[in-house]
Structure formats: structure tokens, C-alpha cells
Image (spheres, helix red, strand yellow):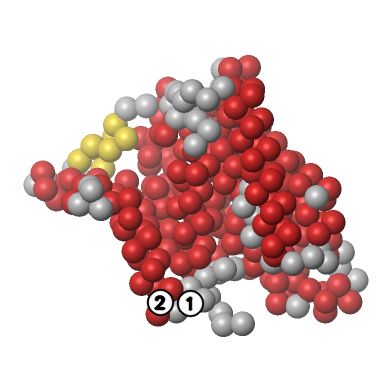
Amino acid sequence: MDPTISLYLSQAIHGFAYGMILFLIASGLTLIFGMMGILNLAHASIFMLSGYICYQTILFTGSYWIALIVAPIITAFVGVLIERLLLRRLQEFGHVEQLILTMGISLFILGAVQLIWGTESIPVLTPPILEGLVDVFGFTYPIYRLFIIVLAVTVLSIMGLILFKTRIGKIVRAAVEDREMVNAIGINIPLVFTCVFGFGTWLAGIAGVVVAPILTIFPGLADQVGMDAFIVVVTAGFGSLGGAFIVSIIFGLLNSYGVQIISQLAPILMFGFMAIVLSIRPEGMFGVKE
């Protein structure tokens, strides 16, 4: 294969892999906002916390695979506690109070990880079975990044099946549209909200584990990746899962090709794209006008 074509294909897969990581984070954030109306500023910190829990689990067990199971479950439990003990008490308040609370939770998580694990970057090793390169369409590509794509697509496919093919999914989608009506027919809306919040943080937990061997774990990870995920949600339109998926891929490709072609401008490409979209459609590419 021509080296130039090979390079561009490799960058495309890099971009798709990063887009899948963004969507794992953004999907939980947009699901929580779409159903509960809560813009959770602590979401990225929970994603970062999962990376640290992944590292600690590997230290205890020596297994990345156990960490891939344990860390998302723990972060989901943390999410359930946050919703049940803190956010539920602010149901009668507006978004400003929710933003202040979730910002406080984010700062608490940041302080906790710095106290427990310090401020230095912590590397997480790629599991041996996923090390090395594999031949893809005539060029070599890291096995671990292909694993990220397969895992993300699998998780998101399961999420789609649950949301659109099961009774639980119908309840969730109905609650998004009209929570009062769903509550009136006897559905326990607070319990549904807690489950949705926990599921959203579980998705962030998976993203935290899979990104750990690529970016390493450090206190600024929440800001680095979380900002990109937040831009995805805003650009796609709050509450639009399908839109978040498409925009995540676009941003992943922008990041990948931007670094290759115009490296100096790469960090602001997503901001520029967001500014263009919001200037045309303030509600986002796939958002619905209130």
C-alpha cells in the first residue's frame, strides 16, 4: 500500500478510536441531561476517578480485565450515591444550584485523587494480549486501539438495544418526553433517574479504564478529555444520543487529522467547529428548540 494512503487510513482509525472514547463519556452526560435535566459538571471527574481505580485494581489483582469490570461498577456506585444523596435534594431548584453542586463534587474528587495518588502521572500498562501491532488492510496498527473501537461499539450497541428494544428503554425514553405522565401511571421515576445516573457514570467509568494505557492517569485528565466530551454534547445538542455519536466521530477525526496536517491549530479546531455550528443552530446540530 502507498505510504501516504496508509498514513491517512491510520489517522482515520486513530480518530475513530478517540471519537469512541469521547462518545462513551458524552453519551452518559447527554443521557443524564436528556432525561433528568442535570448538566453534571462532575462527570469528567468521575471518568478520571475510574482511571485511578483501574490503576489501583491492577496493583491489587495484576489483571487489567478485572479492572475493566470493577472500575466502572465502582464509578456507577459513586454516581448512584451522588444522585441519591445530593442531587435529588435539589430537584426543586434550578440549573445554577445543580451546576454549583456538581462543580463542588468535581473539586472534591480532584482533591481526593491528589491526596491518595499524588499529582504525578501514573502509567497503566497495556495488557500483554493487546500489545503490539496487527496488519489492517495492508498497514500495521496498534491492537489496543482496535480493541477500544470494538469494545466501544459493543457497549454502545448494547445500550441502543436496551433503550430501543426493551421495556426499560421505553420507560426511559417516555420519561424523557413526559416524566409527569410516566409517574402518573405508576412508574417509580426517582428509581429510574437513579438507574440512569448510575448507567451514565458506568459509561464514563469504562472510558476511564480504556483511556488509561493511552494517556496515563493524572489529575488534569478530567479537564483534558472532559472538555472535549462537553463540547461534543453542546455541539450535538443536549439530550441527543445519535447526535453525540456523529459529533464524537467528527471531533475524533478533526483531532487526528488536525495533529497531522495543522498541528499548531489542532487544539482549537473543535472550538471552531462548535462556534460555527452554534452560530447557525444555537440548539446544536441535532438539538430540538425549546
Q: Is mark 2 on a helix, strand or loop?
A: helix
Give the quarter of the figure containing the C terminus. bottom right
Q: Is mark 1 on a helix, strand or loop?
A: loop
Q: In this view, does 20 lie to the left or right of 30?
A: left
**Number of callouts:** 2
Residue at x 49% of width, y 30% of height:
217
> Residue 247, can we see it?
yes
The answer for how far apart the CA atoms under marks 1 and 2 are is 6 Å
> Residue 9, can we see it?
no
Q: In this view, does 185 lie to the left or right of 10?
A: right
Q: Is residue 112 left or right of residue 268?
A: right
Looking at this view, is 115 or 253 the one in front? 115
Looking at this view, is 20 or 110 the one in front? 110
Disc 2 residue type?
Ser
Picture quadrant where residue 36 is located: bottom right
- In the rendered image, which residue does mark 2 sit on? 279
Give the quarter of the figure containing the N terminus. top left
Picture quadrant where residue 58 is located: top right
State if disc 2 and disc 1 touch (CB < 8 Å): yes
| Image spot of residue 163 (x, y percent) | 65, 64
Disc 1 residue type?
Pro
| Image spot of residue 137 (x, y percent) | 22, 46
Numbered tag placed on residue 219 in the rendering? none
- In the rendered image, which residue does mark 1 sit on? 282
- Neighbor class of circle 1 (other Cα within 10 Å; few <14, some 14-19, many 20+) is some
Residue extending farthest left: 2
Residue at x 81% of width, y 59% of height:
90
- Neighbor class of circle 2 (other Cα within 10 Å; few <14, some 14-19, many 20+) is few
